[in-house]
Image (cartoon, rainbow, N blue to C red):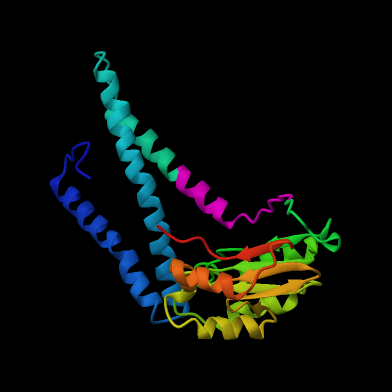
């Protein structure tokens, strides 16, 4: 952060030390979050997560400073360094705040899906898809209750949850899943694990989901009013041969419409 020059060397050193501490805060917070779940650790992890997000915007702001200040120099125009830095980093901070508000803003995206050979009973029905909630130290029961409340108002016929309901950190899995018990879809709710449920043994997550009244699809096919629903866990979908074997075993009827629930592979 010596970018624009520092009139006081001691202040520059202090700034660098502070940034060095903050740079490892997320690593430290994550290590604690995988071992403990209490208000203090939640606060540390949340602050570290927010800082990590802001750092990415500040990095872009620093790059923008060079461009905004350097480009006019090619034409002999000198801009005030402090003003350029203030504007770029101010916009970076604003972008970070907007990003956090956007992440907390629950929206409904409506998509019309036309499936070949769709049973007549399904025409006009609504399926809700809720994915990547990442419940844990940052998003907790309050966030899930907002999701459940919105779903209750939408009144979908069926609910699909294709993975990453949990963040994978140390949490009270039963308490986090409890709000789902307040929601009921006429044709049921269905869940498959994502990569974050695979960070540790997924058994505890699956048990909590089941206790909340959600059915876990264990690499299987079910038929709902003539529509085939296949659910494959993330871990089993990452191996191509294993994935193909599961799809063969469920014996899909190619003359009947089907839906595959699986989390897209990362990377």
Going by the image, does 132 lie left or right of 189?
left
Q: Position of residue 68 (x, y in %)?
A: 32, 27
The quadrant where residue 89 appears: top left
Q: Residue at x 86, y 60 (%)?
A: 120
Q: Quadrant location of the C terminus?
A: bottom left
Going by the image, does 87 lie left or right of 156?
left
Q: Residue at x 71, y 68 (%)?
A: 228
Q: Nearer the viewer, residue 125 or 223?
A: 223
Q: Position of residue 121 (x, y in %)?
A: 86, 63
Q: Residue at x 30, y 37 (%)?
A: 63
Is 107 one of the magenta-colored residues? yes
Going by the image, does 126 lie left or right of 100?
right
Q: Quadrant location of the N terminus?
A: top left
Q: Is residue 24 above or below residue 249?
A: above
The quadrant where residue 141 appears: bottom right
Q: Which residues are magenta?
A: 94-112
Q: Nearer the viewer, residue 43 or 159?
A: 159
Q: Position of residue 21 (x, y in %)?
A: 25, 62
Q: Is residue 27 visible?
A: yes
Q: Position of residue 82 (x, y in %)?
A: 30, 32
Q: Nearer the viewer, residue 160 or 135?
A: 160
Q: Residue at x 69, y 53 (%)?
A: 108
Q: Is residue 137 visible?
A: no
Q: Total marks drawn? A: 0
Is 207 one of the magenta-colored residues? no
Q: Nearer the viewer, residue 222 or 79?
A: 222
Q: Is residue 152 above or below residue 58?
A: below
Q: Residue placed farthest to the left in the image?
A: 9
Q: Residue placed farthest to the top in the image?
A: 75
């Amino acid at each position: 952060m010596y970018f624009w020059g520092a009139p006081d060397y001691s202040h520059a050193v202090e700034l660098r030390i502070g940034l060095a501490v903050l740079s490892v805060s997320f690593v430290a917070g994550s290590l604690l979050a995988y071992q403990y779940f209490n208000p203090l650790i939640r606060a540390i992890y949340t602050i570290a997560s927010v800082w990590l997000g802001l750092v990415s915007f500040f990095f872009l702001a620093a790059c923008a400073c060079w461009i905004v200040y350097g480009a006019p120099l090619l034409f002999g125009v000198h801009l005030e360094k402090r003003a350029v830095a203030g504007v770029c980093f101010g916009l970076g901070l604003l972008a970070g705040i907007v990003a956090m508000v956007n992440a907390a803003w629950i929206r409904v995206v409506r998509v019309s899906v036309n499936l070949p050979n769709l049973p007549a009973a399904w025409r006009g029905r609504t399926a809700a898809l809720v994915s990547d909630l990442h419940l844990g130290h940052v998003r907790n029961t309050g966030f899930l209750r907002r999701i459940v409340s919105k779903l209750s108002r939408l009144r979908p016929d069926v609910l699909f949850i294709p993975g990453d309901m949990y963040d994978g950190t140390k949490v009270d899995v039963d308490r986090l899943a409890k709000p789902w018990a307040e929601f009921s879809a006429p044709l049921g709710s269905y869940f498959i694990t994502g990569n974050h449920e695979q960070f540790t043994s997924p058994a505890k997550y699956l048990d909590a989901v089941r206790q909340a009244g959600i059915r876990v699809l264990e690499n299987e096919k079910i038929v709902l009013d003539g529509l085939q629903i296949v659910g494959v866990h993330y871990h089993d979908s990452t191996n191509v041969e294993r994935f193909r074997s599961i799809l063969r075993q469920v014996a899909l009827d190619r003359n009947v419409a089907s839906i595959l629930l699986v989390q897209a592979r990362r990377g």
